[in-house]
Amino acid sequence: MEPFLLSTERLELRPFATVDTDEVFHAVQDPEIQRWVTLPSPYGRQDAVYFVERVSGQGLREGTGFHFAVRPRGGGPLIGAVGIGVQQAPGTWELGFWTAPEHRRRGYLLEAADAVIRWAVATLPVDRIFWRALVGNEPSRALALKLGFTMEGVQRAATLHHGIARDSWSGSLLPSDLGLPAKHPYLPAGDLAARDVPAGNLAAPGGPAPDVSAAL
């Protein structure tokens, strides 16, 4: 896929390019990014080159991952990054993000991530967008909630972070949560149970528990 631009009221988002390398390197030296984001540590300039040219560039070429540099509309310094990449489960994409320390608490990342999510649902075969963060990363969790994610619990040892398996919070956002169409129709578990249990097995109010063995 060719590089392209997404715009919001205050921001411009485009896939990372070689010109972003130095700013990526300097931003990721921030201790909070190093603490919470799964990145090499220490983070050298060669790691920034690898991210820009291999991770972002290859994902864009193959259509499997889209990593956006977030900047002020009309030009300006690198504010942060928002990425969305395909997962092994069909129709599932994972969202990730970080903000440079000097640009935090201004709502930039909420604006940027919302734009990427809506672009992805409109452009890619999306049934589900997945988010996870190390347990304790309250800013990431708060942002996910503002974006509309439903928290799904804790995944044990789900993230290898600086050589240690760490527990992660996880959540999901469905296109239907935004009033948008998904790749496939969605049948929630509650609807599935009501459909699959024979009507004769449904207990009357106050009656015995239904026999659902035939539906298992």
Image (tube, rainbow, N blue to C red):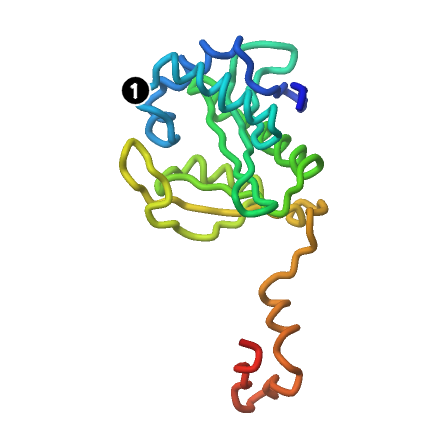
Residue 76 image position (x, y, % from top left): 57, 9
Q: Residue at x 54, y 34 (%)?
A: 85
Tell me the residue that label 1 is attached to.
Answer: 42
* Quadrant location, the N terminus: top right
Residue 127 image position (x, y, % from top left): 63, 47
Q: Residue at x 63, y 20 (%)?
A: 10
Q: Quadrant of residue 13?
A: top right
Residue 95 image position (x, y, % from top left): 53, 36
Judge left or right: residue 122 versus residue 148: right
Q: Residue at x 61, y 78 (%)?
A: 197
Given residues 183 and 29, the one toward you in this image is: 183
Q: Residue at x 55, y 23 (%)?
A: 58
Given residues 110 and 27, the one toward you in this image is: 27
Q: Amino acid at mark 1?
A: Pro
Q: Quadrant of residue 149?
A: top right
Residue 99 image position (x, y, % from top left): 47, 24
Q: What residue occupies the far left of the structure in this picture? A: 164
